[in-house]
Amino acid sequence: MQYIIVGIGGQGILFAGKVLGAVALEKKQRVTGSEVHGMAQRGGSVISHFKTGDFISPLVRAGEADVLLAFDQNEGIRNLHFLREGGAFVVNVHDRSAFDKIQVAGGFISVNTGSAPEANTISVKKKNADEAFDSAICIGCGACVAACKNASAMLFVSAKISQFALLPQGRVEAKERVRAMVEKMDELGFGNCSNTGACEAECPKQIKLDNIARLNREYYKAY
Ligand code: SF4
């Protein structure tokens, strides 16, 4: 059997490959495989090739996979060419479009921030730069909302707010951004945060609750 497992960083693609491998070895089957996860730490594509049986090469050729297991719809469609005719396509159809709507409401910078060399002349505190990058690794997986008893999206929104709020380029539109994103979050029916911390515990990217405190501060300052 030849498997292709795809998704984005943080979803457990490599772990899934390890589980399949352990099951196959338990059944005394030969196992071979290969993984590509160059941008996984930044929420990028991850692909795992996995074979059981008498194969020598670890890579699955286009059109030969018996099973395409996709943890993310887009990644599944992007890798459909691996699937053989009649092969099984198992895809996670979890709808995360609400997160996209929140992002579209304000999760971007639309002012001219100058060229890269100009940006490099603006001093940024190391602590702020580190925290901005730590926030930016949120992959929008939705685990925080699923774990929260209030179905709150505060951890996700706070990560998206923090990645801009901590940098000078993001300060210009900070007030409009936080107002628009919180308004959209409320409009979409997400609950509020009651500080139980389930989101932080479940987040695959270790996004911190401190971001929610920052989001609240930014929101109060915006009025
Ligand atoms: S904050 Fe964490 S759990 Fe929530 S969407 Fe981002 S990565 Fe996923």
Image (cartoon, rainbow, N blue to C red):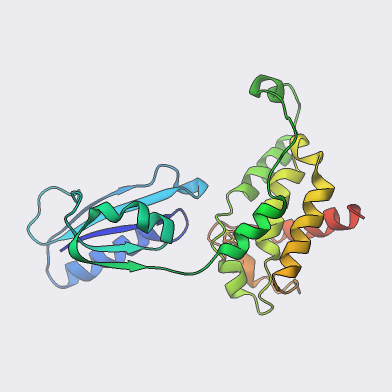
Q: Residue furthest left?
A: 54
* Residue 214 in sight from this viewpoint: no
61 above or below 143? Answer: above
Position of residue 34 measured from the top left corner of the image (x, y, whole percent): 25, 49
Query: Which residue is found at the position 30% from the left and 49% from the top?
Result: 35
Direction bottom: furthest residue: 149
Please identify the quadrant where the C terminus is shown.
Answer: bottom right
Q: Nearer the viewer, residue 95 or 34?
A: 95
Q: Quadrant of ligand 1?
A: bottom right
> Residue 42 in the image: x percent, y percent?
51, 46
Return the residue found at the far right.
223
In the drawing, does residue 125 fall left or right of residue 81? right
Residue at screen point 45% across, 60% down: 11
Quadrant containing the N terminus in the rendered view: bottom left
Relative to 128, 147 lies left or right: left
Q: Position of residue 9 (x, y in %)?
A: 46, 53
Question: Which residue occupies the foreground of this view, 16 or 73?
Answer: 73
Q: Position of residue 20 (x, y in %)?
A: 26, 66
Q: Looking at the image, which residue sits at the far front?
A: 85
The residue lying at 66 percent from left, 53 percent from top is 104
**212, above or below 197, in the image:** above
Q: Is residue 40 left or right of residue 195?
A: left
Q: Is 195 on the left or on the right of 64, as rendered? A: right
Q: Is residue 27 above or below residue 118?
A: below
Residue 102 in view, yes or no: yes
Q: Residue at x 36, y 56 (%)?
A: 77
Which residue is more in the foreground, 131 or 139? 139
